[in-house]
Image (cartoon, rainbow, N blue to C red):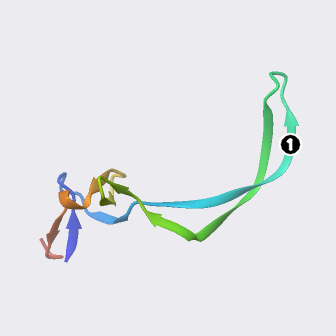
Amino acid sequence: MKLYSPNNTEILGTYESIFARAEISNVSRGDDGKLELDFDYTEVFWETSTTQREDGERLFLDRAGEVFKESELEIREDDE
C-alpha cells in the first residue's frame, strides 16, 4: 500500500523540520557593513526531527515537493 496526494503524486514521507548548525570557517564585513560568511560544513541534529502539523494534522511531502495534510491523502495498492 502507498499514499497518494490529491494531485495523483506518490507521497514520499512526512514533512519534517530539523535543527542544524552551519560551521563558519571565515568571516569578514562587506562594504555595506553586512557580515560575509564562508562555511565548511553543516552538522545536522537528527534527534530534533519533528513532523510538521497544520490544523492538528500531520503534513506529508510528495515527489513534486508539495505538502499535503493527512486528511487529503489516499491509500492505494502498490500496483495501481
Location of residue 34 with respect to 3 vertically, above or below: above
Location of residue 46 with respect to 4 vertically, above or below: below
Q: Is residue 45 left or right of residue 56?
A: right
- List x then y, in percent, for residue 28: 87, 37
- List x then y, in percent, for residue 71: 19, 60
Considering every residue shown, the one lying at the far front of the view is: 56
The C terminus lies in which quarter of the figure? bottom left
Q: Is residue 19 left or right of residue 57?
A: right
Front position in the image: 7 or 35: 35
Q: Is residue 43 left or right of residue 69?
A: right
Q: Amino acid at mark 1?
A: Val
| Disc 1 residue crowd, few under 14, some 14–19, many 20+, Cα 10 Å | few
Residue name at image x 29 percent, y 52 percent: 55
Q: Is residue 29 left or right of residue 52?
A: right
- List x then y, in percent, for residue 69: 26, 56
Front position in the image: 7 or 52: 52
The N terminus lies in which quarter of the figure? bottom left
Location of residue 35 with respect to 69 vertically, above or below: above
Front position in the image: 49 or 27: 49
Front position in the image: 10 or 67: 67
Instruction: Identify the residue under disc 1.
Output: 27
Residue name at image x 80 percent, y 36 percent: 36
Image quadrant where residue 12 sits: bottom left
